[in-house]
Amino acid sequence: MNRLLSAAFFLLAACGMLPAAPEFQAWVAEGYTRRPPLDGWKATARLMARDWPRSSVESGSSAESLRSFLQAAAGRPVVLYLAAHHEPGGQVDLPGSGPVSWLELWPRSGTENWIVVLDLCHARAAALPTGAAACLLFTAEAQEKTWELGLFSPRTSPLAGTGQPLASLREALGPDWNGRISAWGLGWALSAGPRPVLPQDWQQRLLRAQGALKSLPVRRSWDFRSSFSLLQPPYLPSATPPNP
């Protein structure tokens, strides 16, 4: 896994594609009425955005909204974070459009400089086009669901004893944060480093986030809510190159 990530980042650097001030862009689906809201994933997007010198976080409910977001980023080296409900068959389920194929959404060109984090259930099942990005990170295998943590009490928080107090997350996300964060967001929080994230730091920061998430034990004292099931074991997000 480390070799795959290293190769992807080396290719970007060798080709001179990394800007001096990289941009982070996030898109999180909102407006669900028949499925749980993605509060924890919105918090993750906001948390990651703080670590880039240039960043933006958008929300939308339709296929057209996501398609427009992706098209606007085409042709530029960016780090993209995408979160939505996702089907085992690899379709993204949007509140205003229903299940949609990624092939209908992804730009036909201009994505070769992208680094994409798919924070989705069944993320690896996403049917993306060939050459979808320079590097893809999936936060769940094809058969897995992602999970959301509720960090409401310092005593039950998975952050207890890690040197990353709950108060620091509350400070980062502001008084309107409801205590929910995605599993990937927790790994990102535990891998905190210097801000902003510089081009040469991306690889290690992403790998540290993966390692932090893997090292967390599942404890039944966690104040926990999953959109789908209770107390799923944590997984190690994996990275692969684009589909051959």
Image (cartoon, rainbow, N blue to C red):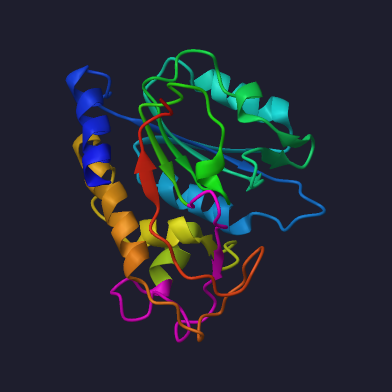
- Residue 185 vertical placement versus 2 (above, below): below
Res 192 seen here: no
Residue 196, position in %: x, y?
29, 43
Query: Of helix, strand and loop, which mostly describes the magenta segment?
Result: loop
Measured as percent of width and height from the top left, residue 138 is found at 45, 45
Q: Quadrant of residue 131?
A: top left
Q: Is 151 on the left-hand or right-hand side of 35? A: left
Tell me the residue at 66%/46% (across/down): 87
- Is residue 158 within the magenta segment? yes
Does 234 sit above or below residue 200? Answer: below
Residue 218 screen position, x and y as percent? 44, 77
Residue extent of the magenta highlight: 140-166
Image height of 76 relative to 121, above or below:
above
Q: Quadrant of residue 79?
A: top left
The C terminus sits in image quarter: top left
Question: What is the total number of numbered labels drawn onto the structure image?
Answer: 0
Which residue sits at x=32%, y=63%? 212
Residue 150 visible to an observer of this rendering: yes
Residue 127 belongs to magenta span: no
> Residue 175: x and y, percent?
55, 64
The residue depicted at 62 percent of the width and 67 percent of the height is: 226
- Residue drawn 53% across the image and 29% down it: 128
